[in-house]
Image: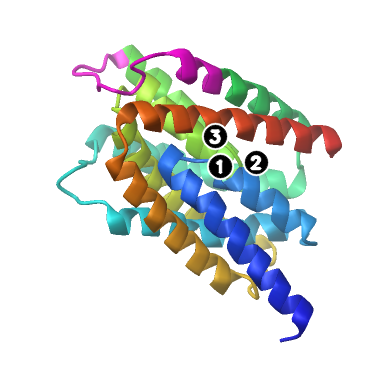
């Protein structure tokens, strides 16, 4: 391995570790940093998408390795929605974007992400308590949103975790830390694994960077989840809001520059 290749590996490790550290605390946002930087380092769009998805699976694995099963329980209804509606949406979104990358969607999602970030920042008590009863209307709206978020996960690669966490907290009524836990299980781990397999079947993955990205994703998520478990919900809310606003700005910038 020559000097330039070693420097590339170090850079890849650094930004992957940092992205996954913050993502594991806020419930998403790794793709806003990791995915664009892979493109800036020379990977084609589809190859960067597949490489990112393979590595970010270990964001979920690293986060789950730290969490204790007694502290968080899986909502069975949410799990069914995430698996049986979300996974097919991820596949369809991935197949669509490989053929038709869309900047208008990135711009729209960026604006909505900023708005949601501002809302959660100024909404005191957001995510501090879960709903005791979930109405049928709320459940149906949540299902529709999960399908949309799944397509975003497959196509845009950026924002799915944040939107999933928002949907789970605001619509399905999960407490914020529990919503982040569900995001790590289903979006970071399962959805990205599905997306990685889909992308890998129709395009190439840059395997040379995958090992170092896996190590960085796992360790970043492990450290970030350690912080999440210790932080009060109010601070987690502020971190989530900050990551959402910054991510939205980055996504708009990427769309405009593209």
Q: Secondary structure at mark 1?
A: helix
Q: Tags 2 and 1 in contact by the CB under 8 Å rule? A: yes
Indicate the position of residue 90 as horizontal and vertical percent values. Answer: 53, 44
Residue at x 39% of width, y 55% of height: 223
Q: Which residue is mark 2?
A: 156
Residue at x 50% of width, y 27% of height: 241
Classify the position of the C terminus by image quarter: top right
Classify the position of the N terminus by image quarter: bottom right
Region rendered in magenta = 116-136
In this picture, is 101 found above or below 239? below
Q: Which residue is mark 3?
A: 243
Q: Which residue is mark 1?
A: 153
Indicate the position of residue 236 as horizontal and vertical percent values. Answer: 39, 33
Q: Give the side of residue 52 with respect to residue 193, left or right.
A: right
Q: Secondary structure at mark 2?
A: loop
Q: Earlier in the sequence, mark 3 or mark 2?
A: 2
Q: Earlier in the sequence, mark 1 or mark 3?
A: 1
């Amino acid at each position: 391995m020559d000097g330039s290749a070693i420097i590339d590996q170090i850079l890849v490790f650094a930004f992957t570790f940092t992205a996954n550290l913050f993502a594991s605390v806020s419930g998403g946002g790794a793709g806003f940093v990791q995915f664009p930087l892979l493109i800036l380092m020379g990977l084609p769009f589809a190859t960067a998408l597949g490489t990112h998805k393979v590595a970010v699976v270990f964001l979920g694995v690293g986060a789950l390795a730290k969490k204790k099963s007694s502290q968080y329980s899986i909502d069975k209804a949410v799990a069914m929605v995430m698996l049986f509606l979300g996974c097919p949406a991820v596949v369809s979104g991935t197949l669509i974007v490989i053929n038709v990358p869309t900047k208008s969607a990135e711009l729209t999602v960026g604006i909505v992400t900023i708005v949601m970030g501002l809302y959660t920042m100024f909404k005191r008590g957001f995510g501090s308590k879960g709903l005791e009863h979930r109405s049928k209307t709320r459940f149906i709206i949540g299902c529709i949103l999960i399908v949309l978020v799944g397509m975003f996960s497959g196509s845009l690669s950026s924002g799915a975790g944040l939107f999933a966490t928002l949907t789970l907290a605001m619509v399905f009524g999960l407490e914020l830390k529990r919503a982040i836990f569900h995001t790590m299980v289903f979006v970071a781990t399962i959805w990205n694994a599905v997306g990685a397999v889909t992308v890998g079947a129709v395009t190439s993955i840059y395997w040379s960077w995958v090992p170092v990205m896996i190590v960085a994703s796992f360790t970043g998520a492990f450290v970030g989840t350690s912080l999440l478990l210790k932080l009060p919900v109010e601070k987690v809310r502020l971190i989530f809001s900050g990551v959402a606003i910054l991510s939205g700005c980055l996504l708009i910038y990427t769309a405009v520059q593209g």
